[in-house]
Structures are given as structure tokens and as C-alpha cells.
């Protein structure tokens, strides 16, 4: 019997984006929360790594958000070929 209730506040744009992804997966937000809680229970912790990015990673992420120093490639092969240079 399902009787426990979870209340959470989240930014509206994050909620819309996440629900769009869940909709594409055919999963309701409630089912996603059930899956998340089940995984926490099974793993005895979060089902993904949680880490604070180091200074270099944080700076790179910030630049990417601003569209600075971003490279685009036509394919994954083109990206790897560029890395070889």
C-alpha cells in the first residue's frame, strides 16, 4: 500500500525539462521518484557519483555555459581526429 507522500520544491524550468525527458522515456515523475528511491535502497547510497568539480572543470563548465571556447564537430570520428592533432 502506497501511503507515504514526498513534497519537494524545484525550479520550474528544471521541472519542465526533466518531465520532458521522463515523458520521452514513458515514465511518470512519480515512477521516476520510486525508481530513484529504490536505487538508493539497493545501493545504500545515491545511484550516481556526486562530486564537487575541481577548479579546472568548474571553469570549463562555466565557459561552456557561456558558449566560450566551444568546438562543434560533424561526427564523433571528426572529434577524435581533432584530438589526435
Image: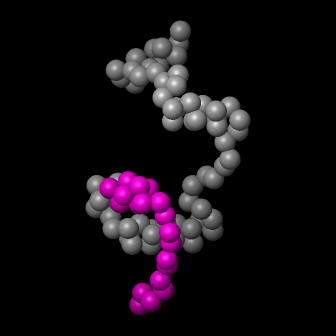
Residue 59 to residue 44: above or below: above
- Name the residue at the top extreme: 85
**Residues drawn in magenta:** 1-20
Residue 54 at what x, y percent from top left? Answer: 70, 38
Q: Nearer the viewer, residue 30 or 37?
A: 30
Residue 55 to residue 40: above or below: above
- Name the residue at the right extreme: 55
Residue 58 at what x, y percent from top left? Answer: 64, 37
Image side of residue 51 versus residue 61, left or right: right
- At 49% across and 77% down in the image, what residue appears? 7
Image side of residue 40 versus residue 4, left or right: right
Colour scheme of the rendered structure: one colour
- At 56% across and 30% down in the image, what residue appears? 63
From where the camera sits, is residue 10 visible? yes
Residue 84 to residue 22: above or below: above
Which image quadrant is residue 30 in? Answer: bottom left
Q: Nearer the viewer, residue 39 or 62?
A: 62
Report the quarter where the N terminus lies: bottom left
Amino acid at each position: 500500500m502506497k501511503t507515504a507522500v514526498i513534497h519537494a520544491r524545484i525550479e520550474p524550468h528544471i521541472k519542465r525539462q526533466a518531465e520532458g525527458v521522463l515523458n520521452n522515456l514513458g515514465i511518470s515523475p512519480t515512477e521516476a521518484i520510486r525508481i530513484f528511491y529504490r536505487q538508493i535502497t539497493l545501493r545504500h547510497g545515491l545511484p550516481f557519483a556526486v562530486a564537487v568539480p575541481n577548479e579546472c572543470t568548474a571553469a570549463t563548465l562555466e565557459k561552456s555555459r557561456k558558449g566560450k571556447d566551444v568546438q562543434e564537430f560533424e561526427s564523433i570520428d571528426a572529434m577524435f581526429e581533432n584530438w589526435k592533432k
